[in-house]
Image (cartoon, coloured by chain):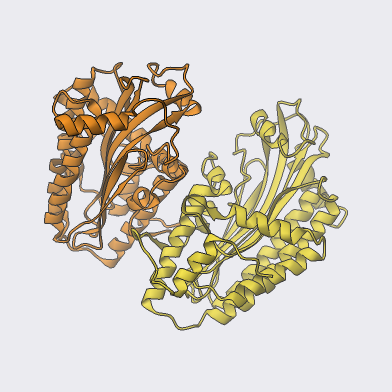
Chain colours: A yellow, B orange
Amino acid sequence: MGALAYSMANGNVQQSEGPTIADRDALTKRENGVTSSSPMRLRMEQLIKTHQKEIVAALEKVDGKKFQVDSWDRPSGGGGITCVLQEGNVFEKAGVNISIVYGVLPRPAIEKMRVNHKALDPDVESLEFFAAGLSLVLHPRNPMAPTVHLNYRYFETANADGSPNAWWFGGGSDLTPSYLFDEDAIHFHRTLKTACDNHDRSYFPHFKAWCDKYFRNTHRNESRGVGGIFFDDLDETTKDREQLFAFVTEALAAFLPSYLPIIEKRKDLPYTEAEKQWQQLRRGRYVEFNLVHDRGTSFGLNTPGARVESILMSLPLTARWQYMHEPEKGSREERLLEVLKKPVEWV
Amino acid sequence: MGALAYSMANGNVQQSEGPTIADRDALTKRENGVTSSSPMRLRMEQLIKTHQKEIVAALEKVDGKKFQVDSWDRPSGGGGITCVLQEGNVFEKAGVNISIVYGVLPRPAIEKMRVNHKALDPDVESLEFFAAGLSLVLHPRNPMAPTVHLNYRYFETANADGSPNAWWFGGGSDLTPSYLFDEDAIHFHRTLKTACDNHDRSYFPHFKAWCDKYFRNTHRNESRGVGGIFFDDLDETTKDREQLFAFVTEALAAFLPSYLPIIEKRKDLPYTEAEKQWQQLRRGRYVEFNLVHDRGTSFGLNTPGARVESILMSLPLTARWQYMHEPEKGSREERLLEVLKKPVEWV
């Protein structure tokens, strides 16, 4: 899911009468700051901004190199911050991106969304919306260290008076090793399970299965990686909004504990030229998933005015496609492919 | 357009009563061989097989290394031959692919195709079809030597008695340099124009514009390369079938003369590490087009039972994505990007 999955409207927004939710939010922030009684939009914006900073700081500490930071504003309100570290000591490419989008949903988009969100008003020509997301992809240099992806997002539409109409949360994180260390997969999933279980014991099994289903290169009948959690469209039919926000807050906070111990353990392992090449082939599969199957990416790329470089920061620095490559019988490479064919329950 | 763009039906074909067109064609071939009075299906199959052999032989002569040749049969009739040369002396990766597909089109596919082909019977639940295509992509090592792509295809549906119902031709070839030599682009287009002009003076301008429109990374507002020709759905509303076959025959024959002089001239030019890296970035754009926009590729990848390795042989051996890469002012790299923004009339 690209971070700009929500740039549904570009700069050319039809303004409705009265203040937009972007105007209202700017005013609220100026007058009161952001507290636990602020609109969810502002709380979510604050949450992802805080985590972007924390994650970037933690990764800079691991890598020793600084991120390049690009901020931009959107004409209709909102904007984004893209942080990219390229050719670092530990990371070949690492992107940590947030975007805050205020815009107007046209009727066809509303009709599509109503399939999952009955709260959406079917009788209007357009609706103001808000979307906030944090998205990251880390591609380490060392083929023994896994790629990791995370995305958390919040979506809201507004009634004409600015009150929230429909809203939902989506998110998750997943791990993509080139060389599989079972203990890494177990640690990653266990950390996420704990975060989930604190909110609802049904979350982890449900979101793990959803992740396995979503991050799949169906054309190769293999998963992109060893999974994690994925969820979307969590709204009032799942839990109330405070409870969901509490869950998202804890799941996001679980990211660094889920990944840092793994990268620390793997980043300096010795590896061969052949192992690096296998990693490059697996990077090719990553590109295939992101460009062929990922709905957020294709949505972003087909949105006029989207910031393409922020969407495609998810792609690895380099990738490789070799015709009819087959790993050796009994090799670690072959075992990975077997695991990717049929997802494993790690915890 | 992937060569397997036509693998619409996989092995599980609903057999109609009586002999299929695959049965009929096998019998005709056995009894009479293929002559100018054979069904167009067999003549097209022969044409693309002959050209695949000629092209492979010519490229082996240029490269000094042999192609790997994989043949396969399809359970419902037809099959394919994929020829790939990887890590050659001249070509980093070169694929020359043919496929012959016999199958059954279900009603929704027929309805989609009727938009362009009114001859298709709207009152049947399914229709037998035949598709034959030759597809090639050559990625040279030397960044001064351009990538080239070609695809020629013929599609036919059959009435219940085996006689042809709707039919059409599609095809074209286009050039994708990392470093632009105007004389190469001019030579390539001039050769294609001559082949087109021999059949209809309106072909070249029309098919050149179609190519520029089709091979475009719309999300970056740039063309994949410097163009060539592209056409699809050429049927009885354009010309009669013999005339179109004669045109396709000549256009295909123009491929080697359009490309060989270019590769000969560029394959041994000196280049720097930085130029090689620019080529890798351009390869990334090639991957983006093929995976995000190319209808043939996405159609093939979404077809159950398709031969993925034959479809994705079009991808380069290696590619690179660098966040916010900008070529230097006044450089050759910058000039290429300018040309790709706004297609040029080369002849």
Q: Of residues A222 and B281, which is closer to you in this image? A: A222
Check the picture and name the quadrant holding the N terminus of chain B. Answer: top left
Instruction: Evaluate whether residue A154 shows in this view.
Output: yes
What residue is at 59 percent from the left and 75 percent from the top?
A182
Residue A207: quarter of image: bottom right
Residue extending farthest front: B18
Relative to B162, say whether B277 is above or below. Answer: below
Residue A256 % position (x, y): 67, 71
Relative to B20, say whether B218 is above or below. Answer: below
Residue B140: quarter of image: bottom left
Residue A251 % position (x, y): 73, 63
Q: Would you say B157 lies left or right of A114 here?
A: left
Q: Of residues B33 and B97, which is closer to you in this image? A: B33
- Count how many numbered circles sit on residues in the image: 0
Instruction: Evaluate whether residue A317 shows in this view.
Output: no
What residue is at 73 percent from the left and 33 percent from the top?
A127
Residue B275 % position (x, y): 28, 61
Residue B185 % position (x, y): 21, 42
Q: Would you say B244 lies left or right of A243 here?
A: left
Residue extending farthest right: A37
Check the picture and name the quadrant holding the C terminus of chain B. Answer: top left
What residue is at 42 percent from the left and 36 percent from the top?
B8
Q: Would you say A196 lies left or right of B175 here?
A: right
Q: Would you say A213 lies left or right of B326 here?
A: right
Residue B11: quarter of image: top left
